[in-house]
Amino acid sequence: MSKKNAILATATRLFSRNGFQGTAVAELSTLTGAATGTIFHHFKNKEALFLQVLKDVKESLLDQFDRHRQQRLPGGSGLAQVLDVVSFYLHLGGTMEDQFLILHRHFPYQMAETSPVCRDHLASIYTSLLDIFEAGIQKGLEDGSVRLDDPRKTAMVLFAMVDGIVRLNTYRVYDAGALYDSLMTACKRLLAGGP
């Protein structure tokens, strides 16, 4: 692993656990063995480092979804595709804890108020995730397995519900696994319009 990648991996862990304000460049230097000057050689300042971490979070999430889709057998209904996306998102929430902690903390959204780059990164992350949810819903509308009027709004509602459960799990408020069956039943009812 290159020094730059080691800095990014450690910064991701520190930002996720300590927040932006609580992450000290000196601690990052100690943990990585990289001099402060080396860190600032790769990243202009702490904000630039965080913005790169946020960009990497997006790329990592989308890469995981791309790999997952490539491993899935083609075919199946749109409803089945959406349920698979929901299940995989829950899986990622459990395996990519640092990345989800970064997305679920308040500081990226505070930074987005003054940083157009941060705002663009967040918008890109959520737009990309919504697109994944919406693609299954759209397929379901075409094959008749989903009965709704507005795929984008439905994707937003569904994503908010699923992401809320991931947040509960991320912050150790409630075990998402204990809600899995209830969530899948709720998703089927929402999408298929049945009991």
Image (cartoon, rainbow, N blue to C red):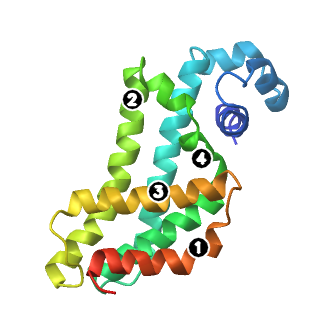
Residue at image point 49% right, 56% down? 163
Residue at image point 52% right, 41% down? 56
In the depicted structure, whether residue 5 falls above or below residue 41: below
Q: CA distance from mark 3 to mark 2?
A: 21 Å
Residue 14 falls in image quadrant: top right
Residue count near mark 1 (Cα–Cα under 10 Å), binned few <14, some 14–19, many ≥20: few
Name the spot of residue 155 as percent of width and height, x first.
30, 61
Residue 38 falls in image quadrant: top right
Q: Which residue is mark 1?
A: 179
Mark 2 or mark 1, earlier in chain: 2
Task: Identify which amino acid the numbered label 4 is placed on.
Answer: Gln
Closer to the observer: label 4 or label 3? Answer: 4
Residue count near mark 3 (Cα–Cα under 10 Å), binned few <14, some 14–19, many ≥20: few
In the depicted structure, whether residue 96 falls above or below residue 101: below
Q: Which residue is mark 4?
A: 99
| In-image side of 33 versus 63 (left or right) | right
Residue 119 — which label? 2
Residue count near mark 4 (Cα–Cα under 10 Å), binned few <14, some 14–19, many ≥20: many
Residue at image point 68% right, 37% down? 2
Mark 4 or mark 1, earlier in chain: 4
Task: Identify which amino acid the numbered label 1 is placed on.
Answer: Leu
Closer to the observer: label 3 or label 2? Answer: 2
